Image (cartoon, rainbow, N blue to C red):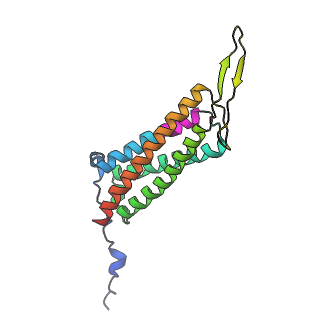
Amino acid sequence: MSEPAANPAATSFPAPAISLPLGLEVLRTYSGALVCLEILFGGLVWILVASSNVPVPLLQGWVMFVSVTTFLLSCAYLSLFITGLADRINTDWNFLDVVYHFIALLFYFAAFVLEAATTAANGGAHITKLANSTESVLCITYPRGNIFTVLDDREYSINVVATIFAFVVTLCYGCSLVMGFKRWRM
């Protein structure tokens, strides 16, 4: 008797849909450069928020979660393309790129808004030295909202820079989303 015919679906797979180059060539594309910027500035947001002693854990906890998670996911995403493993995984990488950058954009926009709210909630408080004394006095002006933080000048400056970098990362994810959408639709 003859051998049964092999099922073609079991022996061959369609090639994964990838429009980005594999290996180090991905770093020469605008998308690869943007992912590198997302990793760089996202890591800076993570470091800056952690170094500010997290004055409002309820708000800045989300900022930390988003910055750490997207940092790790972007590193994994980029390493799949640099190592060439994306070619071995059968999926539509262009669609996954759009979905990932859309979710990251939403999360990072929320993180940017919460970090800006934490920075703006300083309420005009400042610490001054008494004349002819080594003691510090806390001078509080009128609080402007429901959330009120007391940040010294160093923490306030760190939160301002973290807010700026969170905005830059949000822009990077937005640009990556637009470029990924164009690649997916082509």
Point out the stretch of residues depicted in magenta: 43-53
Q: Is residue 126 above or below residue 89?
A: above
At 49% from the left edge and 34% from the top edge, which residue is drawn?
Answer: 161
At 32% from the left edge and 56% from the top edge, which residue is drawn?
Answer: 179
Q: Quadrant of residue 126?
A: top right
- Magenta residue check for 38: no
Residue farthest along the top direction in this orientation: 132
- Magenta residue check for 49: yes
Q: Quadrant of residue 54?
A: top right
Toward the viewer: 30 or 19?
Answer: 30
Q: Is residue 78 left or right of residue 114?
A: left
At 27% from the left edge and 54% from the top edge, which residue is drawn?
Answer: 21
Q: Is residue 16 left or right of residue 102?
A: left
Q: Residue 162, image x and y in percent?
A: 51, 37
At 62% from the left edge and 38% from the top edge, which residue is drawn?
Answer: 121
Toward the viewer: 109 or 41?
Answer: 109
Question: Which quadrant: the N terminus?
Answer: bottom left
Q: Residue 138, image x and y in percent?
A: 70, 24
Q: Is residue 172 above or below residue 151?
A: below
Residue farthest along the bottom direction in this orientation: 1
Toward the viewer: 7 or 126?
Answer: 126
Q: Is residue 161 left or right of residue 131?
A: left
Q: Residue 37, image x and y in percent?
A: 38, 42
